Amino acid sequence: MRTILTTAILFFFTLISVLEADPVRTENAEVELISEQKTVQPGETFWIGVRMDLREGWHVYWRNPGDSGMPLLLEWMNPEGFEIGEIQWPYPEWIDVSGLTSYGYHGEKLFMMEATAPEHLADGEEFTLMTQADWLICEKICIPEFADIELTLTATASDVEYDERWQDIFSETRQQLPVKLDYWNASASFSGRTATLQLSTDAFELPDYQEVIYFAKEEGEIENGADQPYEIDGNTLTMQLEKSTYKSGDIERLWGLLYNPDGWDQEGRIKAMVVDVTIGEEQDDGFLASAADSPLSARLLIILGFAFLGGMILNLMPCVFPILSIKIMNFMEMSGHKPGQVRLHGLMFGIGVLLSFLVLAGLLLGLRAGGQELGWGFQLQNPAFIAFMTFLMFGLGLSLMGVFEIGNSLINVAGKAGTNEGLRGSFFSGILATVLATPCTAPFMGTALGVAVTLPAVTALLVFLVLGLGMATPYVLLSMFPPLMKYLPKSGDWMETFKQVMAFPLFATAIWLMWVFGQQVGIDGLTRLMVGLLLFSIGIWIIHRWHHFKISSTTRLVSRSIAAFLMIGGLLFSAAADPMEPGTSSSSNSYGVEWQNFSTELVSDYREQDRIVFIDFTAAWCITCKANERIIFSSSEVKQKFNDLDVVMVKADWTNRNPEITRALESYGRNGVPLYVLYNGTNSEPMILPEILSPGIVLNALNEISGQQTLTQVSSN
C-alpha cells in the first residue's frame, strides 16, 4: 500500500512538472514558453509566446538589430499538424552602446506567435510544443545564449480555459505591436542620400509630437544612428531619413514602423504605426504598399532586359562549357535529319532550361519566404548536392567513353538523335546546362537576380523565366534554322572518337566538383567522396562485365542488385560528409594576398579607421570567381597597388551557407557571386566593380578610390 501511495505521489508531482515546466535560467536571462490558454480546441488558433526576463542593464534585439546584434531565433520541433506563425515583434527601444546604434529590449518581454492546432486532436489529449531558442544578449559585452523550452497543453472539445497568470503580459504586448491605421496617408521620395517620408491625416489635429522614431524592418536600408529630423505643418508630418552606407542604389521602399510615445491615434494609445510605402507612390490605405511593379512598368521592362542579356551571356561563362560537349554531339547527330525533328530537339532543350530555372527559382523564393537566408546557386552550398553532381559527371563521362551504355536514360543522345530517346536527351541537356550555369553570374545578370528576390513571387518568377529564355535562345534559334546545320560535319565513324573526346570536359568538371567538395568538407570528406566513386565504379564494372554474356535471370537480378547497392551506397556514403565550420583567422592564398574573413563588424571597424576596404564575395564553386582571381591577383601591378594603398583585403567566402554574407549581398542589391566592392573610409559610397574583371578595371577603380582619399585628407587638414 505504501509503495502504491509513494508511486502515486511521485506520478502526481511528475505530472505537475510536465504541465508547468520551469523556466530556463541562463546567466543573464530567464526564458520560458507560455500560452494564453491552458486548453486548446482542435483546428483553432491560439497565442503562445517566448517570455524573456532579462538581467538588469542587459538587452536583446529586435528583428532588425541595427548596427550590431542578432534577433531571437526559434527552431520548432512540434507534433504533426501544428502550425506556428512568425514572431510578432513589439516596438523596440533605441539603444546606443559604444557609438553603435541598436534596436532592442530591456526588462521583461514577450515575443508572441499565433499557433494553429490540428483537427485530429482528441478531447483531453495532451500535447507538447518544443523549440530551441537562440539569442544574443548584451551589455558592454555580448554573450550568445540558447535554451530548449517546451509547453504542454490539453485539447478540449468544450470552451477553452485561459491561463490567468499570463493575461496581463499578453495584453500589454498586444498594445506594443505596431498597427496599420487606415486614417493616415503616406508618401515618400528619395534624393541624394535622403529619403523623405510624409504622413498626414484628416482624422484629428496633430499635436506637437515630442519624439518620432522610424525603425526599418530590414537591415542595411537606413543609417541606424543618424538623426531623423521631422517637422509638423498643419496635419502633415515630414521626416528625413539617411540612406545606409551599406546600401547600393536608391532607397525604393520604406518598410518599418514609426514609434511615437504620444500615440498615433487621438486618444494616444497606439504608440507604433506600420509604414509600408513605395518611393514615389502615395498610399491611402494604411500603408499597404507593395514593392511590386506593374506589368508594363518601365523599371520591370529594364530588369527583364537585363535578365535576357544575362541569360544569353551565361552561355559564354566557363560554368556552362562542360555541357556544351553534349549539345555539340546532339547538333552534329541532328545535322542529317529532317528540319521538323531538328526544331523539336531545340524546343525540348529550351523547355528543359526554362523549367529548370523556374524550379530553382521557386525553391529559392519558397525557402526565403520561410525565413532561410539563401541566394542564387544555393544548391551548390550543399555538399550532398555537390557529391551527386560529381557522380553524375563521372558517370556521363564513362558513358561517352564507352565504358558502359546508359541505355534508355535521358542522356543517351549519341546515335539516337532522331528518336524519342534523343528528345529526352535534349530535355535533360537543358536541365543539366541550367544546374551547371548556377555557379556563374554573368554581366547584367547580377542586377536582375538581386531585384527579382525582392519582388512578389509571380513577378520574380517572370524575371527568372526571361533569364532562362535568354540562355536557351541561341540553341533554339540554331534549331529553328536547320540550313545552318549544313555547315556542321556529317556524322560518320569519326563520331565515336569525337564522342569519347567529349568525355574529358565532363571528367574535368568532376575534378572541379571534387575540389569544391573538399573545400566544403575537408580532406576527410574528400576521402569519403573518392571511396564513394570507387564503389560507384565497381557497380558500373559489374553492369558492364555481365552485360555481354548470356546469364540467367536470377544471376542478372543478383548482379544488378549488387551493382545498385554499391552505386547508391557510394553516393550516400559520400553525401553524408559534414561541412566544415567556417574559419575566423586571416589567411593567404597561392597569389600571396593576405585575406581577412568577412564580417559586417570587421568592415565597419576598418571604415571607421578611414581605411580602403576591398571585399571579394566568392565561392569555391564559382568558376567565374576563380578565373577573376587568377587574372587579377597574378598581376604584380595590381598587387603592388593594393600594397601601396594599404588596402584591407576581405574575403566573403560563400562556398558553404552563410546568412551574414547572404544579407550583405542583398544590401548591395545582389543575390549571387561574384561581387567586388570597394570602400574608401566611412563617408564613401560603395564602389561596385563588374562581375568580369581585368587588371585595368581594378587599377582604374583603385586610382579613383585613392584620389578620393587624397581629397578627403586635404579637406580635413
Image (cartoon, grey):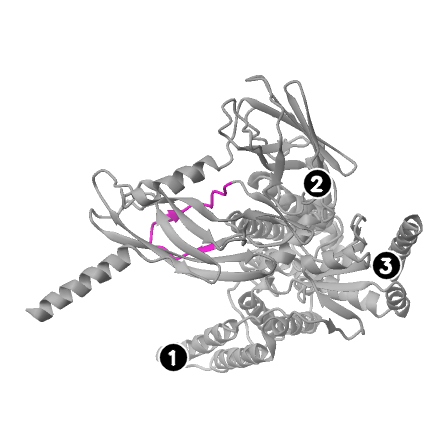
Is residue 341 part of the magenta span, yes or no? no
Q: Which one is closest to the eye, mark 2 or mark 1?
A: 2
Badge 2 is on which residue? 303
Q: Which residues are magenta?
A: 74-90
Residue 342, how many percent across, how many down?
A: 65, 52
Badge 3 is on which residue? 698
Count how many numbered circles sit on residues in the image: 3
| Callout 3 crowding tier (Cα within 10 Å): few <14, some 14–19, many ≥20 | some
**Can I make out residue 418 in this image?**
no
Q: Which one is closest to the eye, mark 2 or mark 3?
A: 3
Q: Earlier in the sequence, mark 2 or mark 1?
A: 2
Front residue (pair 679, 99): 99
Secondary structure beneath dot 1 equals helix
Is residue 87 part of the magenta span, yes or no? yes
Front residue (pair 579, 242): 242
Badge 1 is on which residue? 558
- At 60% from the left and 42% from the top, the residue drawn is 460
Question: Which residue of the protein is positioned furthest toward the left in this rendering?
Answer: 1
Left or right, 440 with reference to 150: right
